[in-house]
Amino acid sequence: MAEADDTDMMMNYHGDFQKSDRKSSRYPYCIVWTPIPILSWVLPFIGHMGICTSAGVIRDFAGSYYVSEDNMGFGRPTKYWKLDVDKVCGNGAAMWDKAVHDASEEYKCRPHNLCFDNCHSHVAMALNLMRYDNSTSWNMVNLCVLSLINGKHVSWAAFLKTWLPFFMLCGVLAMFILTFNLQ
């Protein structure tokens, strides 16, 4: 598990350093993730995703026709994936913020569908609009996988919030299997 310090320094588009601050949930140029109760307990790689502006304000498609700002649908982020603003086509930070804004405005007009048009799709649209890493093929599947691989837990408590329910369910299941197979 990769655990982060309380703050990370990030270069903003003016050449100044910006801090990623977990105490106030500010993650500039990041994709953030938090578990969804019950669903993430069974499948811990599935959760709720949002994308942050250059100032670290979290935007997430939290339900039909609703994109929240700094109030994630399932609680504060437990993981973040820091992206490189230099991989945005055009004027880095300005294009980043415009793409996050435009994707959010589009998703304010859409119904939420858990399997086909969800929070991951909202983040994918923002990345596609900014042509992040010179790509327009971002989707919920590659975001799920890359977030799992590249995401860092914000703390040990966040790691436990993400993984402990899953390990507890596995332990209970193993106990039942062993109990019934050893009789």
Image: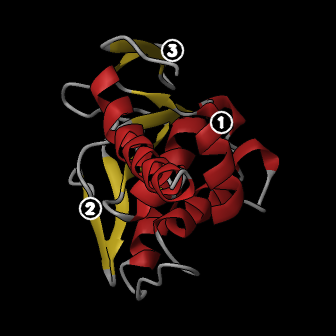
Q: Residue 95 at what x, y percent from top left? A: 56, 48
Residue indicated by mark 3: 15
Tell me the residue at 71%/55% (across/down).
142
Tell me the residue at 41%/83% (across/down).
112
In the image, what residue type sits under mark 2? Gly
Q: Which mark is residue 17?
A: none
Tell me the residue at 19%/30% (across/down).
24
Tell me the residue at 41%/88% (across/down).
111
In the image, what residue type sits under mark 1? Ile
Q: Of circles 2 and 1, which is in front?
A: 1
Contact, CB < 8 Å: mark 1 with mark 3? no
* Mark 1 or mark 3: whose residue is earlier in sequence: 3
Q: Residue 105 at what x, y percent from top left? A: 40, 73
Q: Residue 165 at what x, y percent from top left? A: 35, 46
Residue indicated by mark 1: 149
Q: In the rendered image, which quarter is residue 171 located in?
A: top left
CA gap between label 3 and label 2 equals 33 Å
* Mark 2 or mark 1: whose residue is earlier in sequence: 2
Foreground: 62 or 158? Answer: 158
| Side of 90 where 96 appears, left or right | left
Above or below — where is 41 with respect to 8? Answer: below
In the image, what residue type sits under mark 3? Gly
| Label 2 SS | loop
Foreground: 174 or 67? Answer: 174
Residue indicated by mark 2: 73
| Side of 114 where 95 appears, left or right | right
Foreground: 72 or 27? Answer: 72
